[in-house]
Structure formats: C-alpha cells, structure tokens
C-alpha cells in the first residue's frame, strides 16, 4: 500500500492559481484506505479549495471525480472517455498515480495534491519499476509529472548531469535519463523556462534516509476522537 498525506490547502491553492477550471481527482484504492485522497476527500478538498479561492477573489469552477486506480492505464482510459473539460487536474493519488496519468494523457496537466510518504509492497507475482521514492516533499508540479528524485540515478534537482548521453543515463545505458524526459515534457507543454530556475538542495528530513518511518493519524486511532 502507498501511504501519503494531502498537501496543505494553501500550497494547493498556489499550484492551481493560474487555472480557472479545476478537477480534483480522488483515487479509490490506497489513498482511500488511508483516508488521504479517496472519493470523500476529493469532494471535501474541492469544497474547501473553492471556499479558499473565492475568499481570495478568484472565480473558479471546481469539480471532483474519483478513479478506482490512478496507477493503471485500464482505469485511466475509462476516465479519459468521460473526463471533464478542465484546465488542470489535481491528483490525490500517490506520485505513481500522477506520473501514470501524465504518461497516458500527456496533453493534460496533472498536479500532485498528496505528499507521498512511503510504499508498502506486494513483493511477489508482478514486476514494477520505481517511479516514486516517497521523499515526503513532492515536486512533480515543477517537472510536469516526471520525478527526478526516483528516476534520476543521482536524484539531481538541477539536471541533467554531464554523464547523460543521447537521452540515456550514464549508470545504465538502457535507462532513460530522467532529465532528458523532463526536458522533453516541459518543451511539449511550453514550459522550458522552468529549466532555468535553480532548485535549492533537497530537504531529506521527510524522506527514508533516517530509517523506517511511521505516519500516525491521531484522528483515526481508536479512543482518540472522531475520524476527520
């Protein structure tokens, strides 16, 4: 299971500020189970965000939809046939879901509404490639849906490095350079000016380097109060 916590509403408001028609996308599996981004949370986020933006004097149209799984093309394709006409989609799924949506529907903009914290596995039966490290501080809004933390062998925030050649990583010639993919994505979306912005060093305090992490939701614990 993938665990995450919704970004602060003020941060979400800053991300969607350039857009008027906004769709909040809930995910019906992991995010729903951990009460971070299921159908209920998508509706609540849409309502709270609408109120906040209206208080700031911004006229917006905000809708809420939920996919059973944002990380599988089968469900993304089903959603694509009925998706609302919106300027931007705020995903309440994990970073894998945001990237799956971006890969499958590259003509649309998907922003992360969740800070993915860590992934708990199936270890057998299937084979997966890692698209999200669960660093605890999602930056997919800066790179238009491609994660340099997980997909760059050096987790560079200001890439590509000098070893990248012909779109491939110097560590593994069969592996795409994450920053080459980011460059192409930004070019296709008319946002290459983002490459000029120097990002500060990554704050790893929210990541996995301190050992196994535990996320506690006091509002969900038995005997500590009502669930939020």
Image (cartoon, rainbow, N blue to C red):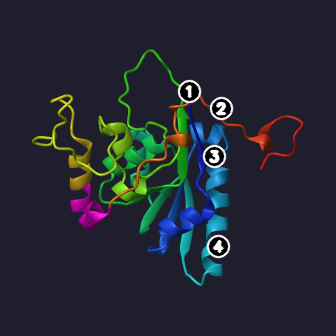
Measured from the top left, where is residue 150 in percent x and y? 37, 38
Q: Secondary structure at mark 1?
A: loop
Q: Secondary structure at mark 3?
A: loop
Q: For the stretch drawn in magenta, what is the main secondary structure?
A: helix
Q: State which region is magenta.
A: 184-197
Q: Is residue 191 left or right of residue 124?
A: left
Residue 222, can we see it? yes
* CA separation in Å, label 3 and label 1: 23 Å
Give the mark, 2 or 4, whose residue is nearer the N terminus.
4
Quadrant containing the N terminus in the rendered view = top right
**Magenta-colored stretch includes residue 188:** yes
* CA separation in Å, label 2 and label 4: 31 Å
For the residues carrying marks 2 and 1, which lies nearer the camera in this image? 1
Residue where numbered disc 4 is placed? 52
Q: Secondary structure at mark 2?
A: loop
For the residues carrying marks 2 and 4, which lies nearer the camera in this image? 2
Residue at the image position 10 percent from the left and 42 percent from the top: 166
Instruction: Please tell me how crowded label 4 is: few (under 14), some (14-19), or many (20+) other residues with Cα within 10 Å.
Output: some
Measured from the top left, where is residue 185 in percent x and y? 25, 55
Dot label at residue 214: 2
Residue at the image position 54 percent from the left and 34 percent from the top: 118
| CB atoms of marks 2 and 1 within 8 Å | no
Q: Is residue 161 above or below residue 122?
A: below
Give the mark, 3 or 1, whose residue is nearer the N terminus.
3
Residue where numbered disc 3 is placed? 36
Give the mark, 3 or 4, whose residue is nearer the N terminus.
3
* CA separation in Å, label 4 and label 1: 37 Å
Measured from the top left, where is residue 198 in percent x and y? 33, 60
Q: Is residue 18 left or right of residue 102?
A: right
Residue where numbered disc 1 is placed? 211
């Amino acid at each position: 299971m993938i665990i995450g916590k919704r970004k602060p509403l003020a941060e979400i408001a800053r991300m969607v500020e350039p857009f008027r028609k906004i769709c909040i996308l809930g995910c019906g599996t992991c995010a729903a189970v951990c009460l971070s981004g299921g159908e209920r949370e998508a509706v609540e986020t849409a309502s709270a965000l609408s109120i906040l933006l209206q208080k700031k004097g911004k006229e917006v149209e905000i809708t809420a939809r939920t996919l059973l799984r944002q990380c599988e093309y089968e469900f993304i394709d089903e959603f694509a046939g009925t998706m609302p006409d919106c300027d931007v989609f705020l995903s309440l799924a994990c970073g894998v879901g945001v990237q799956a949506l971006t890969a499958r529907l590259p003509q649309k903009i998907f922003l992360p509404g969740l800070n993915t914290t860590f992934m708990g596995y199936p270890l057998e039966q299937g084979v997966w490639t890692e698209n999200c490290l669960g660093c605890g501080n999602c930056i997919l809004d800066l790179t238009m849906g491609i994660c340099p933390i997980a997909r760059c062998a050096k987790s560079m925030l200001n890439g590509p490095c000098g070893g990248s050649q012909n779109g491939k990583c110097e560590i593994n010639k069969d592996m795409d350079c994450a920053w080459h993919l980011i460059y192409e994505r930004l070019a296709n979306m008319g946002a290459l000016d983002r490459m000029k912005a120097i990002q500060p060093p990554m704050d790893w305090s929210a990541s996995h380097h301190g050992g196994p992490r535990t996320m506690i939701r006091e509002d969900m614990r038995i005997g500590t109060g009502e669930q939020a």
